[in-house]
Image (cartoon, rainbow, N blue to C red):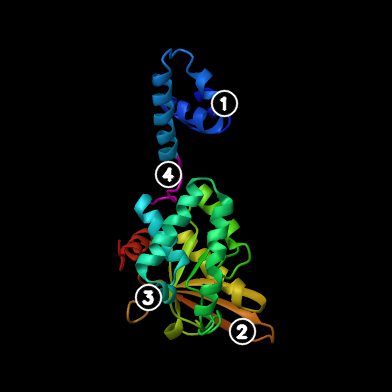
Amino acid sequence: MAKLLALAGYKIEGKHAAAIVVEWFPSYAPRFFTGRQSPGVVESIIARAKDTMGEISKSRLHLHGLNGRDSITAIWKVLFSPTLREHFGSDRSLKWTEKLIANFAEGNQTAFSAQYKSLIPEVNAVMSICPEYSMSNPPWSMVSIDMLLGMIPWVTPAFDKGFAILLENGSALEKRFGEVLSFAFFLRGGPGDSKGTAFRVCAPTNPVRASAEHWLMRGYLVRRQQGFHATLAPDEAGRTFSLHRYTDQHGIEKDVFFETTDSFGREEEDFREFLQDEIQF
């Protein structure tokens, strides 16, 4: 059975093979244990196998580079901006997130999507009194499947479908940067037309942080032509910036600044600090 699973692309230890049989081939499970003469023993093994399958499913929820707890926190923070957490409360929003993850772990895509969609009307009501997302008011978070285009919770059509794909894989499907968790948060800034209004991006790795700059610009800038990109040397205050120059629809050259003072070269540490900030369990 372990060899069969390996051929299917699953790296499952032999001790877990019984669990797979019970989960995927329930009618075959009793015959799988033909060496066990006692029905009680067979029932006990099947019960333990189901528990093991549950543990295997839980392990698949870990996002790349994160443990189980940090994975839950990252998902929670992606879905609930500070504005939404203030409205729903940390306890309610976290429990809602844990239930959403449980639906995913059980392989219940219907329940997963239904739960997500059920909250959209209330989220829309909260966000209706806030300015629309733009370069002046960037979204709190974005995720990406292909590292080219960003998806925004509660805004992008069929976000639940794309998000489920990310949860299933634990990382972006595009591998040119290796295995990376394609979550990004825009902590402050906007519209980014000067150093004083520069965006502050928090992401798990340098490639994701740099890619998120493009996700935002592709989503909210109208550009006739994309110009150069440069990593600026530290200014007199020791601050560092990522600069993008582009030509707008009227032919005027403009700049977009992203401040990298707290993140450049230490994206992983910056992201972990962000996950632990104001966490309430």
Local secondary structure at mark 1: loop
Judge from the rendering whether residue 55 lies leftward or rightward of residue 147; answer left or right. left
Mark seen at residue 253: 2
Give the overall secondary structure of the magenta segment. loop
Mark before the other along the chain sequence, 4 or 2: 4
**Nearest to the observer: residue 181 or residue 258:** 181
Query: Which contiguous range is marked in magenta?
Result: 57-67
Residue 188's place in the image compared with 105, above or below, is below
Judge from the rendering whether residue 35 lies leftward or rightward of residue 107; answer left or right. left
State how many labels appear.
4
CA separation, marks 2 and 3? 23 Å
Mark before the other along the chain sequence, 1 or 3: 1
Residue at horizontal 43 percent and vertical 18 percent from the top: 39
Residue 93 image position (x, y, % from top left)? 41, 66
Mark seen at residue 234: 3
User: Quadrant of residue 160 in the image?
Assistant: bottom right
CA separation, marks 1 and 2? 67 Å
Question: Can you identify the residue that label 4 sits on?
Answer: 58
Mark before the other along the chain sequence, 1 or 4: 1
**Nearest to the observer: residue 163 or residue 122:** 122
Mark before the other along the chain sequence, 1 or 2: 1
Which of discs 4 and 3 lies nearer the camera? The answer is 4
Mark seen at residue 27: 1
Mark before the other along the chain sequence, 4 or 3: 4
Residue at horizontal 43 percent and vertical 61 percent from the top: 96
Residue 99 image position (x, y, % from top left)? 44, 56
